[in-house]
Amino acid sequence: MTTQISSASYPPPPRQTANPAPVRPANSLRRTSSIDVAWPDGVDGQRLFVGRARDYLTGPDGIGRTLAMGEFSLRMTEDKMITRIAAEPAPASIEQLVGARAGGHLRMTLREIMPDLIAQADPLYLVLDDLSGTALVSSFAWGQWFPERMELIRKRLGGNDDNPVLAQRANVCWGLQDGNSGVTGGASLENVADADAGHLRNPADPEGWHEFLEHEGPGFRRARRIDVTRDGNLIRIASAFQDSAKLREGGRVAIHEYNLGATVDAETLEVLSLDPEARILPFRECPGAVHNVARLVGRNLGQVREDVLEMLRGPEGCTHLNDALRALADVPRLVEELRQPA
């Protein structure tokens, strides 16, 4: 049963980025990940996806070193079929993803053919797991690079109760519940993507992020950051997520951004607190999704992937916030790495 809360119960998102990332704290482990999407062969050609993830350990003196990295490069058709893929380091089963489609079933396929990546909390798994969401949202980048394409989207999604495009989106997530502005056409599409994405990399801490793909033309990026520290018997987590697109005139515009803080019992892995912060979201009702996150408090962090799918499915949650929560499943393994000397 969906928890009904008036959109007035939550203020609209501030539509201001929290970027850049904070300077890495001492005695911490930072996991960063990104998927960059480009169209080297034009809008009708296959998309290029480059995913990168890195675990970076920072010692008491602030000096850091890379513990692990993972990267993939793949091509994908308009209907989201993977036509070729390479990874480094390459799992033996990576070629089995050729012919698969980036949708809900892809995560099931990953669990079946790459269980070791999940068990080892390999950073490569995080970007592979993020592929479906990135494939869904990345076409947003074309409307930012070519405004005339955005105008076509506005006409397709204009305010019309009988609009079949809008009807197909109803109840896929909290923000698109039946009757909300993103479904009825009541939202101002001119304002859906008008927030400056800022810069992920902090000039005071250039090592705080891995290197991103640089390319010409339109581009989309999904980026995540997870900072993990120990505080006595507590694990403290500070994470961030952003979807953004390149602008022809320079800079980037963001369509989704969350910050997420958490504390976890270091011995039992019980989730003691969760503090999601909606920063940039497309529709005024979207921030209400943070309410149901409280259902995960008291649960075991190691089971967060399963709990999110069970408790926050469809209109019970926000797809992007859910993915930010699921990404925390690897934190117990990351905490173990904090015991290593930097």
Image (tube, rainbow, N blue to C red):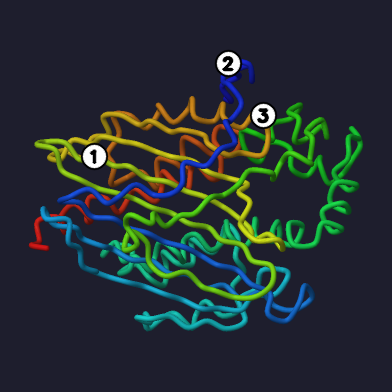
Which residue is under mark 2?
9
Mark 2 or 1 closer to N-term?
Answer: 2
- Front in this rendered view, residue 4 or 68: 68
Q: Is residue 209 left or right of residue 60?
A: right
Q: CA distance from mark 3 to mark 2?
A: 11 Å
Mark 1 or 3 closer to N-term?
Answer: 1
The amino acid beneath tag 3 is: Arg
The amino acid beneath tag 2 is: Ser
At x 73%, y 28%, the residue is 180
Pinpoint residue 222: horizontal percent, then vertical percent.
53, 58
Residue 275 found in image quarter: top left
Q: Is residue 271 left or right of residue 184?
A: left
Pinpoint residue 157: horizontal percent, then vertical percent.
85, 44
* Crowd rating for badge 1 (residues with CA inside 10 Å; few <14, some 14–19, many 20+): many
* Crowd rating for badge 2 (residues with CA inside 10 Å; few <14, some 14–19, many 20+): few
Pinpoint residue 163: horizontal percent, then vertical percent.
89, 41
- Numbered label attached to residue 169: none
At x 39%, y 54%, the residue is 202
Residue 134 found in image quarter: bottom right
- Numbered label attached to residue 284: 3
Q: CA distance from mark 1 to mark 3?
A: 30 Å
At x 50%, y 59%, the residue is 130
Q: Secondary structure at mark 1?
A: strand
Which residue is under mark 1?
236
Label 2 close to label 1 by CB (< 8 Å):
no
